[in-house]
Amino acid sequence: MDDSSVVNEQELDTNNDGIVDTVEYDVDSDHDGQVDEVILVEDTDQDGTADTYEDILDTDHDGVADTDIIYLDSNEDGAVEEVIVVEDTDHDGVADTYTVLEDPNEDGQIDEQHTYVDTNEDGTIDQQVS
């Protein structure tokens, strides 16, 4: 993301306690005039250090997220230990695939990957693919 792609930046106080806990960036990465990516930087424990980064992609510009990528840095050392990818592969507005990538030793290499599928999109995982 280059700075020219950011079309809006907001500081949010999601729990109304007077402390900013989320910064939202609306991004037009292909410069077509439509927001196709929303990036959230969150400080969920409000200690002043970001611990969650979320990248929400609307690649087909239908106003519904196609992919939601969540990066977790639970010990707040700047290294991501876990990435969760939620996808709406058939673009019907309901997530159907969930992938968890784990790097517990924070060496930049994925040590474990698990993919779960909700084939009938009822909110229950029907199968684990990997």
Image (spheres, rainbow, N blue to C red):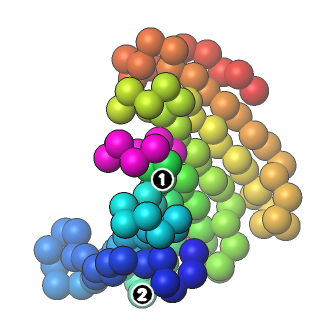
The earlier-in-sequence mark between 1 and 2 is 2
Q: Which residue is identified by label 1?
A: 57
* Amino acid tagged 1: Leu
Under tag 1, what secondary structure? strand
Residue at left 63%, top 53%?
83
**Within 10 Å of the Cα at label 1, are there few (<14), some (14-19), or many (20+) other Cα atoms?**
many
- Main SS, magenta residues: loop
Q: Which residue is identified by label 2?
A: 48
- Between 4 and 127, the one nearer to me in the picture: 4
Residue 36 position within the rendered picture, expressed as x and y whole percent measured from the top left:
43, 58
* Amino acid tagged 2: Gly
Residue at left 49%, top 25%?
90
Q: Is residue 38 visible?
A: no
Look at the image and give the residue range highlighted in magenta: 60-68
Q: Which quadrant, please, contains the N terminus?
A: bottom right
Residue 52 on the magenta span = no
Residue 44 position within the rendered picture, expressed as x and y whole percent measured from the top left:
39, 69
Under tag 2, what secondary structure? loop
Which residue of the protein is positioned furthest toward the front in this rendering? 32
**Within 10 Å of the Cα at label 2, are there few (<14), some (14-19), or many (20+) other Cα atoms?**
few
Q: Is residue 100 visible?
A: yes
